């Protein structure tokens, strides 16, 4: 019985170990805010940064230590309007800005 428990435990452990991915939300967040400004979607100086929601949707390790990272950001302005942006970029353990950031506005809500 003890051998069976050990075999089961050893077979489950690899699925429970998660590789650490770079914590690189700042680069795509800042680039998406600049994109919102340059596309005349919102004045980023009116954003309430304390309310920003950040979710890492995916981080796939590629060759040469690079990661493709996909983030979901929800920005709120001081009037309560929200702007949801999905970003995709490359990062590494040493550098978050290994590529440009692709930004996509997926939702915008205005409170009147």
Image (cartoon, helix red, strand yellow):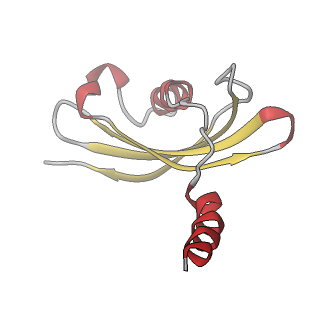
Depth check: give the residue in front, 17 or 22: 17
Residue 92: quarter of image: top right
Figure disc tally: 0
The furthest residue to the right:
64
Residue name at image x 31 percent, y 35 percent: 52
Residue name at image x 45 percent, y 27 percent: 37
Q: In this view, does 64 lie above or below 95?
A: below
Q: Is residue 98 above or below residue 59?
A: above
On the image, the x and y values in percent for residue 67 come to 71, 39
On the image, the x and y values in percent for residue 76 come to 27, 37
Q: Is residue 57 above or below residue 33?
A: below
Residue name at image x 16 percent, y 35 percent: 79
Depth check: give the residue in front, 76 or 92: 92
The furthest residue to the front:
2
On the image, the x and y values in percent for residue 77 come to 24, 33
Residue 63: quarter of image: top right
Residue name at image x 62 percent, y 74 percent: 3
* Horizontal side, residue 103 vs residue 55: left or right: right
Depth check: give the residue in front, 56 or 51: 56
On the image, the x and y values in percent for residue 104 come to 55, 47
Quadrant of the drawing holding the N terminus: bottom right
């Amino acid at each position: 019985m003890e051998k069976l428990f050990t075999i089961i435990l050893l077979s489950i452990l690899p699925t429970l170990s998660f590789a650490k991915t770079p914590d690189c939300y700042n680069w795509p967040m800042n680039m998406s805010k600049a994109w919102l400004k340059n596309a005349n979607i919102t004045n980023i100086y009116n954003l309430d940064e304390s309310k920003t929601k950040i979710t890492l949707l995916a981080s796939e390790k590629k060759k040469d230590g690079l990661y493709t990272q996909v983030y979901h950001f929800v920005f709120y302005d001081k009037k309560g309007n929200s702007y949801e942006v999905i970003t995709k970029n490359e990062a590494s353990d040493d550098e978050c800005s290994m590529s440009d950031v692709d930004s996509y506005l997926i939702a915008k809500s205005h409170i009147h």
